[in-house]
Image (cartoon, helix red, strand yellow):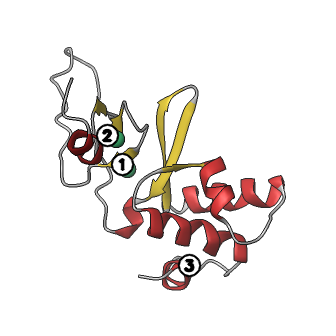
Amino acid sequence: MSAFDILSRHKLKRTACREGIINTLIDASIALSEDEIKSKLAAHFDRTTLYRSFKTLEEKRIIHKVVVDNLMIKYALGDALSKKAEHPHFYCKRCEMVQCLDSTDIEVPRLPHGYAFSEAELIIKGVCVNCKSTHYNE
Ligand SMILES: [Zn+2]
Ligand SMILES: [Zn+2]
């Protein structure tokens, strides 16, 4: 699916910024930070345009935020694109790559009596396949 299809499916106007963000994430296939996305965009957009585009795409669930910690926030394509709404994310401690694990389920642990579940976030930390195959120690 192209950025154009995604935007029209969500009845959003095509803008260079929105299309750029979506295309960058399609190409990357991993989660990227705002700065990483910015550096890959062909054109320069001002802060406000970028901020608004991220916000709109997030509201429409075309992209979703992955909060690894206060210093690392990444974006990935969202569940509007057939991804499960709840899925864990993988963080590679070596290359700092963040990826959606959309074929892995999050199991919600049993909650204390009277507590209601709303959502769960899970970040799994480890070493990704690329890093593992290039350095076999550790
Ligand atoms: Zn890695
Ligand atoms: Zn994800």
At a point 19% along the width and 32% down the height, the residue shown is 108
Indicate whether 58 appears above or below 131: below
Numbered tag placed on residue 90 in the rendering: 2
Numbered tag placed on residue 7 in the rendering: 3
Marks 2 & 1, CB-CB < 8 Å contact: yes
Indicate whether 82 appears above or below 117: below
SS for dot 2: strand
Residue 65 point in image, percent of width and height: 50, 46
Residue 99 point in image, percent of width and height: 36, 48
Distance, label 1 to label 3, CA atoms, is 23 Å
Confirm or reject: label 1 Cβ below 8 Å from ligand 2. Answer: yes
- Relative side of 65 to 109, left or right: right
At a point 45% along the width and 62% down the height, the residue shown is 28
Residue 22 point in image, percent of width and height: 54, 69
Amino acid at circle 2 = Phe
- Corner quadrant of residue 59: bottom right
Residue designated by label 1: 99
Residue 47 point in image, percent of width and height: 81, 53
- Corner quadrant of residue 93: top left
Q: Residues within 10 Å of mark 1 (few under 14, many from 20)?
A: many
Looking at the image, which is closer to me, 112 or 87?
87
Looking at the image, which is closer to me, 110 or 67?
67
At a point 58% along the width and 80% down the height, the residue shown is 11
Dot 1 or dot 3, earlier in sequence: 3
Looking at the image, which is closer to me, 109 or 97?
97
Please identify, in this view, whether the residue under mark 1 or under mark 3 is nearer the observer. 1
Distance, label 3 to label 2, CA atoms, is 27 Å
Whether residue 119 is visible: no
Amino acid at circle 3 = Leu
Amino acid at circle 1 = Gln
SS for dot 3: helix
